[in-house]
Amino acid sequence: MKARKLAAILAFSAVVLVAAACSGQKGQDYAGEPLAQVRGSVVLASAPAPAQATVVMAWTNFAKQGDTSVAVQLPAQASFPSNFTLDIVVAPLPEQMNDFGGNGKLPNEVRIGLAGIVAVAPGTDLSGRTRPVPVLGVVEDYEVVYVERDAVPNTIAAAFLGGPLRAGFHLMRVVRSSLSSVDQYKASQACYAALPPGTSEQQRYVQCHPSDIFDKLQEAEQGFDTNITLKLAPAKQLDFPNTF
């Protein structure tokens, strides 16, 4: 599953954005400054270190048939690859977000953007990719989400986000289960089997997502003030978030 996810995340086209020196989250209509800023440090898990790297955010739409991804290449400030700062200056496009409402079938659901953060070699052709891009590193324990409007309690979106988050950008911590994959699968199947007949797909997800096989998301306690870590290593040594 990790290899499939890697291919899905990194088969993308790219939009290059202009970075600006600012911190924190701003309203979507605040022109001239980032909507959110991600700060991080880089650790080297194995030698030799790449001479240079580019940080990439990949918005992944997994809520429709077949995962699709669009990456946003963000120029890194400061002293990358020791430290980096990413300014997010636009929200993801509608086609880059996950529509849990099924195109209006569930009007209380909201669209969610989910982005992983990876490092690739500078000059990598990011446009119109049909093959996976070689990865130099990944942020293993955090992802970025964008909530189009306030999430409603007891919905798929709220369950996926670990709570009814407000509209805007959020830095999310990836929480991995202490159970083995086999025990996770058994717990998930037991949850679904225990649901009463006629339970809606929405409520099936709400009830059983806490015990399913995927990593969970929780909003980082310090939000975008959190200093995240990007790990540089061969792909087989990286623990990619498995949140979908």
Image (cartoon, helix red, strand yellow):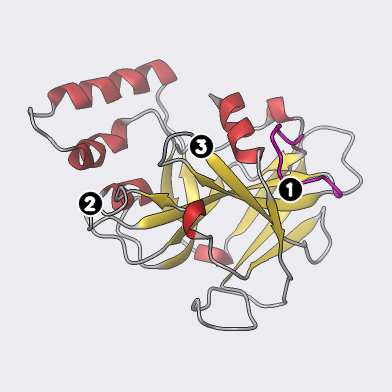
Image quadrant where residue 141 sits: top right
- Residue annotated with mark 1: 127
Question: Is residue 129 rendered magenta in the image?
Answer: yes
Q: Which residues are magenta?
A: 122-135
Left or right, 26 with reference to 232:
left
Find the distance from the CA under tag 1 to the CA under tag 2: 34 Å
Q: Position of residue 134 (x, y in %)?
A: 77, 34
**Callout 3 amino acid:** Asp
- Residue annotated with mark 2: 106
Find the distance from the CA under tag 1 to the CA under tag 3: 17 Å
The image shows residue 74, relative to residue 68, as above or below, that is below
Q: Position of residue 128 (x, y in %)?
A: 71, 44
Circle 2 SS class: loop
Left or right, 26 with reference to 12:
left
- Residue annotated with mark 3: 67
**Residue 140 is at least partly visible in this image:** yes
Q: Quadrant of the C terminus?
A: top left
